[in-house]
Image: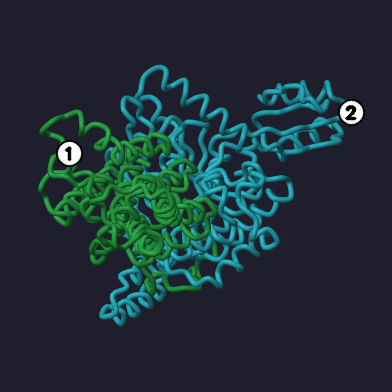
Chain colours: A cyan, B green
């Protein structure tokens, strides 16, 4: 539970309990949950630099989205965290230690890298049973997790006949098997239908609300926007941003307001005189960059112009993201030093 | 940086204490056994392995295709020996290559991240299944030979501990399959390689003159011939090394292959 308790040697138990209380009383809430720390991780495959000097921390109690275009190093990062690939330098810690040193990894970290990584001839239940045995997990958990992911009815069917959506659910069941404090899911939404997507959003939020560390990669910005409250964004193996979704959008979006008025020409003139940039919005009104919505309202009032609509328009994560990654690609084409800029700006 | 939400304040309490359990060798063997018995393909292959020796014992005895100086033991066990070796080798190989093929190996290694544990557990299952199945099927084959062949015409042969040795030899080749499968990763390539190890000494050795007894003596089939006191086990073909010493040679290169497999798992990304 607490990172200190993970020492787990019987003789140290008394001390550890005291430490645990101390931590709580002192109010260092974050140390209670399990964190994922990636520290200066670099991974090279032959001549290809998949991940370069990547550092970030994933905190408990949040769904953290791991964003990046395809091939940006998300899966590589996850494999290194899980000890499957050896980093060229740097590395990752889970619960304060390298993954391979966890005494019972499935109890600490539940991971799903590839939903199809199941022997097609084995039933869903037997697949989970084999995994449960490997970490001494009681078999009572099988039916619990099968129920959680909604596969109870097909538990006795062979996984080879599963749709991608069912495979995803089985993969998530496997990740939940050890009731871990950390969940690491690579593109869990892939292949799910609308109902499934809604289900997984709720599940991830609920898991985070229980104080777990939930780390979910995706290349679908719209999906992350709905699920995650924190973000780690990478592009070409480098960190672009580590922030809350709100901060990320605030920092990088342009403030737009859509305004409509029956006296649209007069409004445009007034706004432009006030120094705003005015463009036509597809909805028929004006898209105003510059003044806050309140200022626009006041301006209209002073000029005696009636307003029919005054609507602040936030950039979606998708807008911000594509802008930012486009920038990082441009920078990369030129001077290497320059692409540190967006990262610095965020911190 | 934003602040942590209230939800974290309680901290996450797992249902099971992460320290109350281990993911060690014993758990891995338990897991591999579960995986072994829950696949139709491995069960079928094991059943065929169990039938190989008795089936050929029946054929050999029914056709009375023995040399006058053959033992009943040798006649009963050697007929299906090559088939049993090949089947055991394939079984061992598939235990690991099927995981590479499906990507399941990542799930397995994430559950048991210490690289010695998984190959050791798979080797244990391969060896255990190979040993038990061969001990039973070998004894059955010998029983068939005793029942069907004329004990006055042919010498019986010392069944014990030869049957034990045969079971160990088949177990050994199954473990070799695990080792080669781990290194090669692809089912077809690994099966080809391990069948090569079984068959090539028998095919090549007669062509090599004096080298024959060295190659034959260290080959699995040579070991089987010696153990079953077959008339095939001549000094020219399999050398003068004793049956058990030859078995030790086979065991030694099997262990070496498994160690190579562990090294490969440690140093190669999965």
The answer to whether residue A118 is above or below residue A134 is: above
Both on one chain, marks 1 and 2? no
Q: Is residue B59 visible?
A: yes
Mark 1 secondary-structure assignment: helix
In the depicted view, which residue is nearer to us: B61 or A107? Answer: B61
Q: Is residue A53 visible?
A: no
**Which quadrant of the figure has residue B263?**
top left
Which residue position is annotated with label 2? A262
Instruction: Identify the disc placed on residue B151.
Output: none
The x and y percentages for residue A143 are 61, 68
Gap in Å between the C-alphas at discs 1 and 2?
98 Å
Which residue position is annotated with label 1? B215
- Quadrant where the N terminus of chain A sits is bottom left
Residue at screen point 33% across, 75% down = A19
Residue at screen point 44% across, 35% down = A73
The x and y percentages for residue A301 are 81, 36
Q: Is residue A273 left or right of residue B241?
A: right
In the depicted view, which residue is nearer to us: A61 or A28? Answer: A61
The answer to whether residue A172 is above or below residue A252 is: below
Subunit under mark 1: B
User: Which of labels 1 and 2 is toward the front?
Assistant: 1
Subunit under mark 2: A
- Quadrant where the C terminus of chain A sits is top left
């Amino acid at each position: 539970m607490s990172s200190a308790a993970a020492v787990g040697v019987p003789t140290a138990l008394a001390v550890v309990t005291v430490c645990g209380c101390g931590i709580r009383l002192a109010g260092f809430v974050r140390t209670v949950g399990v964190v994922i720390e990636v520290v200066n991780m670099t991974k090279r495959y032959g001549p290809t630099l998949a991940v370069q000097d990547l550092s970030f921390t994933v905190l408990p109690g949040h769904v953290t989205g791991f964003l990046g275009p395809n091939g940006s190093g998300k899966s590589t990062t996850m494999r290194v965290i899980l000890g499957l690939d050896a980093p060229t330098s740097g590395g990752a810690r889970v619960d304060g230690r390298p993954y391979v040193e966890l005494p019972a990894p499935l109890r600490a970290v539940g991971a799903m890298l590839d939903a199809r990584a199941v022997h097609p001839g084995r039933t869903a239940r037997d697949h989970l049973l084999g995994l449960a045995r490997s970490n001494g997990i009681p078999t009572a958990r099988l039916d619990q997790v099968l129920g959680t992911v909604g596969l109870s009815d097909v538990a006795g069917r062979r996984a080879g006949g599963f749709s991608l959506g069912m495979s995803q659910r089985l993969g998530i069941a496997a990740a939940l098997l050890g009731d871990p404090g950390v969940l690491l899911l690579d593109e869990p939404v892939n292949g799910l239908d609308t109902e499934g997507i809604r289900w997984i959003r709720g599940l991830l939020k609920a898991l985070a609300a229980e104080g777990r560390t939930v780390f979910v990669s995706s290349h679908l910005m719209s999906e992350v926007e709905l699920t995650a409250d924190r973000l780690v964004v990478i592009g070409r193996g480098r960190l672009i941003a580590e922030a809350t979704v709100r901060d990320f959008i605030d920092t990088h979006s342009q403030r737009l307001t859509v305004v409509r008025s029956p006296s649209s020409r007069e409004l445009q003139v007034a706004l432009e005189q006030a120094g705003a940039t005015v463009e036509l919005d597809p909805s028929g009104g004006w898209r105003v960059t510059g003044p806050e919505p309140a200022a626009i309202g006041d301006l209209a009032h002073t000029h005696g112009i009636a307003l029919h609509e005054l609507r602040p328009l936030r950039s979606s994560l998708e807008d911000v993201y594509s802008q930012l990654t486009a920038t990082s690609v441009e920078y990369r084409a030129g001077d290497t030093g320059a692409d540190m800029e967006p990262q610095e700006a965020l911190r | 940086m934003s602040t942590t939400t209230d939800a974290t304040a309680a901290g996450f309490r797992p249902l099971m204490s992460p320290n109350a359990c281990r993911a060690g060798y014993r758990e891995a063997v338990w897991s591999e056994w579960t995986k072994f018995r829950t696949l139709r393909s491995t069960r079928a292959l094991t059943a065929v392995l169990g039938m190989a020796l008795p089936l050929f014992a029946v054929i050999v005895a029914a056709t009375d295709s023995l040399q006058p100086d053959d033992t009943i033991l040798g006649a009963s066990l050697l007929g299906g020996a090559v088939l049993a070796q090949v089947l055991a080798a394939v079984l061992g190989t598939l235990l690991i290559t099927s995981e590479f093929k499906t990507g399941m190996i990542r799930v397995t290694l994430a559950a048991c991240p210490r690289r010695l544990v998984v190959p050791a557990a798979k080797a244990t299952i391969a060896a255990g299944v190979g040993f038990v199945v061969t001990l039973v099927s070998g004894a059955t084959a010998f029983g068939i030979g005793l029942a069907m062949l004329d004990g006055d015409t042919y010498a019986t042969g010392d069944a014990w501990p030869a049957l034990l040795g045969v079971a160990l030899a088949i177990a050994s080749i199954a473990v070799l399959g695990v080792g080669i499968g781990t290194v090669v990763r692809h089912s077809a390539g690994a099966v080809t390689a391990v069948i090569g190890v079984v068959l090539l000494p028998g095919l090549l050795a007669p062509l090599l003159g004096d080298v024959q007894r060295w190659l034959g003596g260290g080959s699995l089939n040579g070991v089987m011939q010696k153990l079953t006191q077959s008339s095939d086990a001549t000094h020219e073909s399999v050398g003068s090394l004793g049956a058990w010493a030859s078995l030790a040679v086979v065991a030694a290169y099997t262990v070496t292959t498994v160690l190579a497999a562990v090294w490969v798992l440690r140093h190669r990304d999965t």
